[in-house]
Amino acid sequence: MVDKTFVANNDSSTITVRNGKQETLDKIFKLLRMRGFNIQADQRILEEYPILANTHWEGSKGNLLFKANIYPAGFQLEFYQEVVTENRHGGYYDFDKFKKMPYLIKCEFIITRKYISHLLELEGYINKTEPEFMYAADKVMNRIKSCWHYKEGKELPDYEIPSYNARDKDDKQIYNGQVKYFRDHKGRLKRGTVYHNINNMWWVLLNKYEYTNVASFQLFDLVKGEEVIPKLYNRNIPQRIKVEKARTRFNEQFNYLMLRETHINHLRLLISEELVDHDKEINMSVKVPLKKDTVVLKTKGLKYAAIKVNGSYFDGREGITFNENGFIGFAGWASDYNVKPFVNAFVKWMDWLEKVSEKVA
């Protein structure tokens, strides 16, 4: 049986029809013309790709515009406007087209969407539009139950979640419905009711209308009085700032001419040690592989070196790279927090290198 569905989300300006046929699209065009829309072949496509002109259209009613195209798996209509735009190429290329619509244009679009949705339902298409909820709890429960890996009862307190995805900052087991604390990116203490999302990520209901997504290792129970004190004078320096400081120190104290392969091997060892401690903290598995990617010139020192890392779901990502142009890269793929072991290892390595250089001198 052919799956005939459509999606017309309330916060989107796009209507997508799965397994939609040309005759259904023609009926929509007829409806739109009756409501005052002018419709023609997409003029840009007609000029640049004339062979595709019979599958691409554009239309307008006052300031409300749309483009439509049909393809083997269905068709799509995308509405937009040119009154309030950000992209220099026009409103069609803007993100958040629905939010940017002025009030009257938005009202016209909402009415048009309602008529199109009603027609599609009469044609036998099932409405798969995401439901709209007012409260955070309803939004989170909908996200949990609509996720592809959902199993019956996953949102209940007694549902067994793998321990490696449900250990908090203090290595305590986390259960659905518990109240947990965490600190946001500004160091402010927050709390909420937690429900498992996916992997080690947890939904946190902050209040009646707000929720967020937090990693398990960021959650904790408030058992110490000092945890309540805002971190006004003890904020951690962002890792990327530490990266710049490390680069500056290297450029001031060292250079590629001083380096040999044995120095790079020692850095690889320090990174491995730091990753072991970091893995325990965040329940990840990141390791430095045995294979080396190092080029050393015997008379002129180091030319290029790349220390790469492997993880449970990736291989060969950047750890630390000594580029030929002199730029040192630190785990460009990683979040600010996950750069930490590489920066720490590099700083320890420079301390070691400084002592070694003094002995040689």
Image: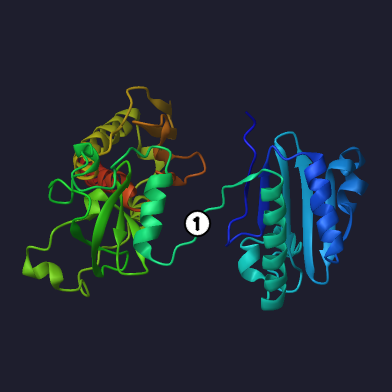
Q: Is residue 58 above or below residue 98?
A: above
Residue at 24% x, 60% y is 193
Viewer can see residue 258: yes
Whether residue 94 is situated above or below residue 53 in the rendered picture:
below
The picture places residue 334, in percent across and down from the top left corner, at 39, 46
Q: Nearer the viewer, residue 324 or 174?
A: 174
The residue nearer to you, when weighing 201 against 104, is: 104
Which residue corresponds to the image point at 47% horizontal and 46% vertical from the top-left?
327
Residue type at tag 1? Pro
Q: Quadrant of residue 134?
A: bottom left
Front position in the image: 166 or 160: 160
In the image, what residue occupies the spot 12% across and 47% down? 172
Q: Residue at x 37, y 48 (%)?
A: 144
Query: Is 190 situated left or right of 43 in this image?
Result: left
Q: Secondary structure at mark 1?
A: loop
Q: Quadrant of the C terminus?
A: top left
Residue 312 locus on image (x, y percent): 34, 31
Mark yes or no: residue 298 visible: no
Q: Residues within 10 Å of mark 1 (few under 14, many from 20)?
A: few
Tell which of 190 and 204 is nearer to you: 204
Instruction: Give how far across and how far down residue 22 sits, in percent.
Output: 81, 40
In the rendered image, the quadrant that contains the N terminus is: top right
Q: Which residue is mark 1?
A: 131
